[in-house]
């Protein structure tokens, strides 16, 4: 096996271990958890659970929500560490008990970034995100029927997910500075 193929295989294992091994504390007592179902092999879909250890949201002047999250698994050296970043832009502003909702609708854009020592993989897509309730300065949001696909890759980062579905719950405190910081990092990696 040549060195490049071996490096790609090792990088794939590192990313898989990072996706599966992120069992860090949640963003808040309820935590934020995502389930990613990869359809890279349509006959054998793989499911990954991600617990985001930093989350935050802010509401833009127009009323849109930006919900962000970060999960980090430090490694023994720079090549072992895995950082995952999430940025969800929710356009629709439902009023619970008043607004009809339909889980087949699309109301959000989603960007998901996986950063390893070998490179960066950027996934983008759309989904249905319902901000369930705000508890003081904290937002609970359900992510349903999110669909992602690889849009860019730099370095030797493997495409672990291919086309993927995203579901989960985000429990994010209101913290504009943290949310903007994570959003800017996603923008830098995505090249936007």
Image (cartoon, rainbow, N blue to C red):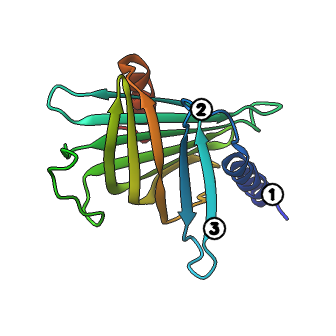
User: Alpha-carbon neighbours of circle 2 within 10 Å: few (<14), some, or many (≥20)?
Assistant: many
Residue 27 vertical placement versus 39 (above, below): above
Which of marks 2 and 3 precedes in the sequence? 3
Dot 2 falls on a residue whose secondary structure is loop
Q: How many marks?
A: 3
User: Alpha-carbon neighbours of circle 1 within 10 Å: few (<14), some, or many (≥20)?
Assistant: few
Where residue 66 sits in the image (x, y, percent)?
A: 32, 34
Image quadrant assignment for residue 90: top left
Does 69 sit left or right of 95 as displayed? right
User: Alpha-carbon neighbours of circle 3 within 10 Å: few (<14), some, or many (≥20)?
Assistant: some
Where residue 50 sits in the image (x, y, percent)?
A: 60, 47
| Quarter in which the C terminus is drawn | top left
Q: Nearer the viewer, mark 1 or mark 2?
A: 2
Q: Which residue is mark 1?
A: 6
Tell me which residue sits at (70%, 51%) in the image.
Answer: 20
Alpha carbon separation for disc pair 1 and 2: 31 Å
Label disc, if present, on residue 70 of the rendered structure = none
Q: Which residue is mark 3?
A: 46
The answer to whether the residues at label 3 and label 2 have Cβ atoms under 8 Å apart is: no
**Quick one: which residue is furthest to the top in this view?**
177
Residue 173 vertical placement versus 95 (above, below): above
Asked whether 36 or 170 is in front, the reply is 170
Dot 1 falls on a residue whose secondary structure is helix
Which of marks 3 and 1 precedes in the sequence? 1
Q: Nearer the viewer, mark 1 or mark 3?
A: 3
Does 51 sit left or right of 57 as displayed? right
The answer to whether the residues at label 1 and label 3 have Cβ atoms under 8 Å apart is: no
Tell me which residue sits at (39%, 20%) in the image.
Answer: 175
Q: Which residue is mark 2?
A: 53
Dot 3 falls on a residue whose secondary structure is strand
């Amino acid at each position: 096996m040549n060195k490049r193929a071996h490096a790609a295989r090792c990088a794939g294992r590192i990313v898989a271990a990072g996706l599966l091994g992120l069992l860090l504390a949640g963003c808040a007592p309820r935590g934020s958890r995502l389930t990613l179902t990869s359809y890279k092999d349509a006959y054998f879909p793989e499911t990954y659970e991600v617990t985001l250890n930093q989350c935050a949201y802010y509401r833009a002047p127009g009323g849109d929500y930006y919900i962000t999250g970060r999960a980090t698994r430090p490694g023994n050296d720079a090549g072992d560490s895995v950082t995952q970043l999430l940025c969800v832009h929710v356009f629709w502003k439902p009023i619970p008990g008043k607004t009809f909702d339909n889980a087949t609708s699309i109301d959000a854009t989603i960007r998901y970034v996986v950063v390893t020592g070998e490179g960066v993989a950027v996934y983008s897509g759309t989904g249905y995100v319902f901000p369930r309730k705000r508890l003081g300065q904290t937002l609970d949001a359900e992510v349903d029927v999110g669909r992602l696909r690889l849009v860019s890759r730099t370095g030797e980062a493997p495409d672990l997910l291919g086309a993927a579905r995203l579901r989960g719950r985000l429990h994010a405190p209101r913290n504009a500075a943290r949310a903007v910081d994570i959003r800017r990092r996603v923008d830098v990696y995505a090249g936007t």
